[in-house]
Image: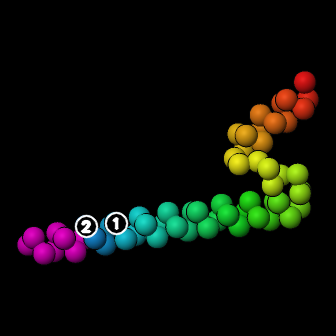
Amino acid sequence: MSMMAILLMSGVVTVIAVIGLADALTHLLCWSARSLREPEAMGATSPSADAARRERLAA
C-alpha cells in the first residue's frame, strides 16, 4: 500500500513538473516572438513592467 502511495505521489509531482516546464517554455517562446516583432520589448521583464513603462512614457 505504501509503495502505491509513493508511486502515485511521484507521478503527480512529475505531471506538475512537466506542466510547469511547458508553461515556462510557452512564456519563453511568446516573449521571444514578441521581442522579434518589437525590439524595444526586450527590456521588459514582465507584462506589468512593460505596462508601467508605457505609463511613464505617456505621462
* CA distance separating discs 1 and 2: 6 Å
Residue at position x 83%, y 52% in the image: 41
- Mark 1 neighbour density, 10 Å: few (under 14) some (14–19) many (20 or more): few
Tell which residue pokes out farthest to the left in this image: 1
Packing grade of label 2 (10 A; few <14, some 14-19, many >=20) is few
Q: Amino acid at mark 2?
A: Met
Which secondary structure class fits the magenta region best? helix
Front-most of residues 14 and 59: 59
Secondary structure beneath label 2: helix
Judging by the rendered image, the residue that carries numbered circle 1 is 13
Q: Where in the figure is residue 46, as x and y percent of width and height?
A: 69, 47
Element type where label 1 sits in the image: helix
Tell me whether circle 1 and circle 2 mark residues in contact (CB < 8 Å).
Answer: yes
* The stretch drawn in magenta includes residue 23: no
Q: Which residues are magenta?
A: 1-8
Residue 4 screen position, x and y as percent: 15, 74
Q: Nearer the viewer, residue 7 or 35?
A: 35
Please state, as top left, top right, bottom left or bottom right, where the C terminus lies in the image: top right
Is residue 6 a member of the stretch shown in magenta? yes
- Identify the colour scheme used: rainbow
Tell me what residue is drawn at x 76 percent, y 48 percent: 44
Q: Nearer the viewer, residue 13 or 43?
A: 43
Q: Quadrant of residue 57?
A: top right
Query: What residue did someone put label 2 on?
Result: 9
Q: Is residue 35 above or below residue 8?
A: above
